[in-house]
Image (tube, grey):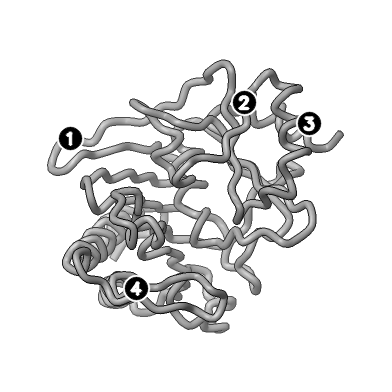
Amino acid sequence: MSTPGDLGTELAVAILAARRAAAAILERRTRPTVSTKPDGSPVTSADLAADAAIRTTVREAFPGDAILTEEGVDDGARLSNRRCWIGDPLDGTRYFIAGSDDFDTFLALVVDGMPVVAVSLQPATGLLLGAVAGRGAWRQEGDGPRRRLTLSPRSPCRLATKAWLGAPENLTALEAVARTLDGQLLQAVFSLCPRCFLPPRPTIDAMIGLSAERPLDAWEWDIAPTDLIVREAGGAATDLTGAPLRYNQSVPRFASGLIVAADPVLHRSLVQALQR
């Protein structure tokens, strides 16, 4: 068991849980059973098997911790627990069903409302991203060495949003922001996961959730790992006012808006532009 302030065991458990989930996903890749959830989104046998793998791994190591995942039943008891593991066992289910490699396993440990350990694993390639609060972020390809991640500002900036972040209703406002910053607004992005921001092939510089006419579908399990990994690599993640995102909330959803940016200077510019 880790001592206070030492999160080495938690990181090891997060990696093990993600790898077990990835194995469960790949075992079911050729013929997944697909059904439809009440909200109309698809769920597969791979989603459920990955969820079970994460829950089993976390409970074996930390039986007193709470768990919140996209596919699990939300237990209100988590609200009185300082420690909550938050994850999406298979982020990108539609791409998985379509045969794309663009799906990931997300998992983060949140303590007192803030992510302190995070991993993102791409099962199809074995690309693992990880971070521990105050200790930086890293990437590892397969069994290779871990390499420190550092984000660098780029110009012109590439801003991204998607349907679950408020598009298309928010496009007029975000196009104006992009023009103000001499940037580009992207919609045709497969995913908004941590690897989209990171070297050696970053595809976006910021993702923006902005509610124009309806609440966002941005849930804590979608955002928590990206939040910590990007911040530990030198970026920023906040709500639209610049305040830190808080997790393990009674409604685990960022319904009004958020900004995750690879560069703190860009982040500040986005906060200012969105307040105008």
Residue nearer the viewer, 21 or 79: 21
Q: Is residue 252 left or right of residue 226?
A: right
Circle 4: element type:
strand
The image shows residue 231 at horizontal and vertical percentages of 51, 38
Residue holding disc 1:
145
The quarter of the rendered structure image containing the C terminus is top right
Q: Nearer the viewer, mark 1 or mark 4?
A: 4
Q: Residue furthest left?
A: 143
Please tell me which of labels 1 and 4 falls first in the chain: 4
Eyeballing the image, is 52 above or below 236? below
Q: CA distance from mark 3 to mark 2?
A: 17 Å
Please tell me which of labels 2 and 1 falls first in the chain: 1
Residue holding disc 3:
272
Please tell me which of labels 2 and 4 falls first in the chain: 4
Q: Nearer the viewer, mark 4 or mark 3?
A: 4
Task: Kindly identify which numbered label has been placed on residue 213.
Answer: none
Kind of residue at badge 4: Thr
Residue holding disc 2:
184
